[in-house]
Amino acid sequence: MRTTSAILSKIFTRRFYVQNTGFFLVLFYLLFGVVNGANLLAYHKGLLLGFLGNYSFLFLVLLLWTSYALKCVGFILKTFQTQGYDFLYPTMGSIDKATRRGIWFRLHTAIYMPVLVYAGIAVVIAIQHQFYISAVIVAVLNIANCIWPLRLYERKLEQPDVIFFTGHLQRWLNQHFTKPPVLYFLYELLTNFPRRIVSTKIFSAAILWLTFLIMTRGEYFDLRGLQIGVMVSVLTHMQLMVHHRAFDDTYLNFMENLPIRLVTHYLRLIGVYVILFLPEMIIITVNAYTKTTPWGLVTVFCTALSLLILFRVMLFFPKMNPEKHVRNTMLTSFIVLFMVLGHYEWPAILLLQAASAIIFFVKYRQYEPYIESAS
Amino acid sequence: MPEPVIALREVKKNYQDVNILDIARLELPAGIYWLQGENGAGKTTCMKVMAGLIPFKGEILLQDNVSSRQHPVQFRRLINYAEAEPFYPSFLTGRDLLELYLRTKGGDPEQIRAISEKLGVHVFVNNPVSSYSSGMLKKLSLLLAFTGNPALILLDEPLITIDTRALAVLYDLIREYNAKGVSFIITSHQPLDAEEVTITGTLKVAHKNITLN
């Protein structure tokens, strides 16, 4: 018969490494694949000495390690909330506290192990090179990162309904703040699909960063160049739009019985995409405010938001499946691209806005999810 | 005949190419109606059409002058609906939903608070709906159906999943609201307790039509 630890290790440790294979492959490539084998030891020694001898760099590394600890904690807590894993509450809850703490410790350290190994080597190197304070900081932080999560795991067993780290904070927020409908989709993404929104935002930010890099290298700034970058950044949001429609279809049908004016529904939809695109608007402002006028920035934001809203509104055609949606968004993007290149930005924005409003006001009350027949 | 609380005119509902409802004319005076029909007959579709949840052809009038086509907002103010199997975003709390309904449908918050306490919803109203059992979700959905100042409340299978105490409260509410002039259409495979509510008429959904007995 297998031991409790072996079964729990299968549930937590093995699943963690299997689910994060991609993450570890990228990490291993960055740590061991970017330099040739002969220089590998020197590279790592240089890296270790680099952060052990510089407190700012060390702080950054500690931040990364703690982020990884949070990822581990999030994984274990999320497992408890995953459908089919409810049995963990009665089973783990039946184990005596001291033994259970030992189990938590072993499970957590097993998934935190990559950091512990690297941190262990860092401590040895730090002592060898007499960076005693850095050694103590690294050791203390990693011991702390192995201990504080145990309290959270215990708490999760005691309070199964608590999703965030602090039950009190969650309850306080729930008691004092009412979520406005404009934030529903963002809550959905952040609570149930964080990877989807994070990956979209990383891609979108990378495209903007590349746009600014190309213009900086070329020692020029052209608003049209930025608008093209922004259009590509908008296209990275397409999977979120399809998700948005599915979310509305599945969960927000009840809102159709509420006496809400059509214009309010439309403003809510615009609000969702303004909030969703806010990080990009901040990136653009920070990078471009010295190179263009405020009006230039407004033009860029209006182009982006007009495209986002039209692309979302297109999904009010019930038969618009993701394939047709891509085709239509690409076609629209090409038309807008040529209008932008010809300095017809504002006519393009007005046309996009008019098309969005017409489609929305005609289609919203008629919309019903279309289920494609199997044949 | 007294003024109908709801009148359906040439109402047709298709799912893709399949016709589900085809009601030439139906007028219901104020009262409590039991909507019957076999599984798949179209009871829930009929209720969703009446509640403005899904599009349809034709027109529905409330209180003889509020049209589903011409007055969509006012129409939704007068008709409330509690689903058979309510489904809400997992991160919302009961309180989020309650405030949204009170803000849009209106009504007396104190009265809703009192019903919430009677149904026992106040105990879990600040928790996310993801932590609710099916009975708790059902109670919340029933509570939401009593917000605002409706002329007609549609209750889809209200008797299932709730406990006996909540059931007694629900019967009390139906009687109390009906006395104030609110009409009800209730679907249920279980017979409605004749000692608790007096049924005005029975509606039968069959062959894509609704007939009043």
Image: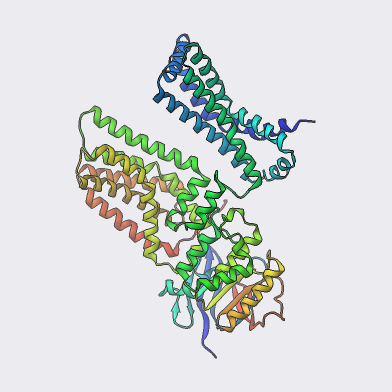
> In the image, what residue occupies the spot 43% across and 24% down?
A58
Question: Is B170 situated above or below B65?
Answer: above
> In the image, what residue occupies the spot 28% across and 33% down?
A212
Q: Quadrant of residue A202?
A: top left
> In the image, what residue occupies the spot 38% across and 60% down?
A266
Q: Residue furthest front?
A: A133
> In the image, what residue occupies the spot 48% across and 79% down?
B61
Q: Quadrant of the N terminus of chain A?
A: top right
Give coordinates of residue B59: x percent, y percent: 47, 75
Question: Is B19 situated above or below B67?
Answer: above
Query: Which one is in front, A23 or B99?
Result: B99
Q: Residue furthest top?
A: A38
Give coordinates of residue A361: x percent, y percent: 37, 63
Query: Which one is in front, A61 or B144?
Result: A61
Query: Which one is in front, A249 or A37?
Result: A37
Query: Which one is in front, B194 or A98?
Result: A98
Q: How many marks?
A: 0
Give coordinates of residue A236: x percent, y percent: 39, 41
A288 left or right of A318 in image: left
